[in-house]
Image: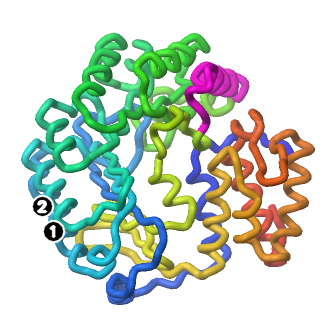
Amino acid sequence: MNFETRYKSHHNSSGLIGKYYPQRRVAENEFLNKLNEKPKDVPRAVYVHTPYCDKICSFCNLNREQLSGSLDSYADYLVSEFDRYGQYRYFKEKSVDVVYFGGGTPTVYKNDQLEKVLQSVNRNIKFSKGYEFTLETTLHNLNDEKIELMNRYGVNRLSVGIQSFSDDGRKFYNRTYSKNETIDRLAKLKEKFNGEVCIDIIYNYPNQRVEDVVEDAKIIKKLDLGSASFYSLMVHEGSTLSQDIKEEKVKIQENLKKERELHDAFVKELTADSNYYVLELTKIAKKGRDRYKYIKTRNFGGDTFPIGVGAGGNVDNISVFRMKKEMSMFVEKSEYEQRLDRFSGLFQFPQIEKDMVDEILNSEEKVVFKDLISELKDSKFILESDKEYSLTEDGLFWGNNISREILITIVEKTLGLTKK
């Protein structure tokens, strides 16, 4: 098994099953009725989207826009959504394991706006023991008052968009602050914030050196950060970067040798002393620290309740996407889609338990899967033990391709389709 193009995101290997099944749109009433049923005993997350930033990163084309006015109305909208849904059995009768504020930049709000949003979360949600409450943020959007607010209202995890500590990298990504100031601000943030501080790293910008990613990893260890996500730069149409470096874009996407060198150097350095380990295809965490419950909930068959324009998720078998404040789309997923989505989610992690595979797949699917595993082992992507499958170094680098290949092959062969 060989791959020529690397898929760099889990989005490339998820949501594929829908193309084989016609989607059945359902009315909002069906969704609301489900919220008044007895809640199922599954892990549950709430995802809250803020589609605004006060500074746009050069590589970004996500669901966001540059802030040009007050966010009072949007903050009030989020408050009203929490107050609205908080009246249903779904929230009244069962606790929530994860709350995740993504964006955009969820800390772009003024202090009073952020406080009323956090108050509405606490007013309408019961947190489970060991809950995880994350806000994505940039360093320049934080101040002492916001940090104190987050401490007061139970936020216990921050995901900070650093992208690179290198001065050249920070300039390329349109980041605020120099390398030294970034390190200093992260150190002070760790002192003031009561929870876990995690960061994002994006590698493979033009002319980046192996020494740069090794230095990034060393700084992460020195600062004793809870985890680091690490993604290879993706140049999306619609981003500033796609307009500014068209020639470099080709180099970035096609130079797999450089991408692999940078990837492996970062992983090797950060995991060198065994204090950090690969938690997920694109995340390295410190042992006993960041658990990243949000991604586990999404990939292991839990609910993700979406709030905010641009938010997507699901409650049981109904997928939800919030297109506008007063417009959402509701789609019913078949048992087959839910089952195979959960199966695909297993392969976002470096170890896959055999018992979980056996629990999900039917007998026909297991036959196809066994042949795929044999091929992946021959290609040195996977190792097999009595209880689990483990991705090798090659398997980790090509993880999203492997996940996609396994899912498409199983679906198409068991449905009698020709795999392309």
Q: Is residue 64 above or below residue 177?
A: below
Residue at the image point whose x is 88% and y is 61% from the top = 370
Q: CA distance from mark 1 to mark 2?
A: 6 Å
Question: Where is residue 117 shown, x and y percent of the image?
Answer: 16, 56
Which quarter of the figure has residue 411?
A: bottom right
What is the secondary structure assignment of the residue under circle 2?
helix
Which quarter of the figure has residue 243?
A: top left
| Residue 262 shows up from this direction | no
Residue at the image point whose x is 31% and y is 57% from the top = 48
Looking at the image, residue 104 sits to the left or right of residue 108; the answer is: right
Q: Amino acid at mark 1?
A: Ser
Q: Magenta stretch containing residue 274, yes or no? A: yes
Q: Characterize the magenta stretch by its predominant secondary structure.
A: helix
Q: Is residue 220 above or below residue 202?
A: above
Q: Which residue is mark 2?
A: 76
| Between 20 and 399, the one nearer to me in the picture | 399
Q: Is residue 307 above or below residue 388?
A: below
Residue at the image point whose x is 54% and y is 38% from the top = 283
Question: Where is residue 2 shown, x and y percent of the image?
Answer: 84, 42
Looking at the image, residue 48 sits to the left or right of residue 402; the answer is: left
Q: Crowdedness of circle 2 by 10 Å Cα count: few (<14), some, many (20+)?
A: some
Question: Where is residue 33 shown, x and y percent of the image?
Answer: 34, 89
Q: Crowdedness of circle 1 by 10 Å Cα count: few (<14), some, many (20+)?
A: some
Q: Which residues are magenta?
A: 256-278
Residue at the image point whose x is 69% and y is 27% from the top = 260
**Which of the numbered marks, if any, corresponds to residue 205?**
none
Q: Amino acid at mark 2?
A: Asp
What is the secondary structure assignment of the residue under circle 1?
helix
Count how many numbered circles sit on residues in the image: 2
Question: Where is residue 37 shown, x and y percent of the image?
Answer: 37, 87
Q: Which residue is mark 1?
A: 80
Q: Magenta stretch containing residue 57, yes or no? A: no
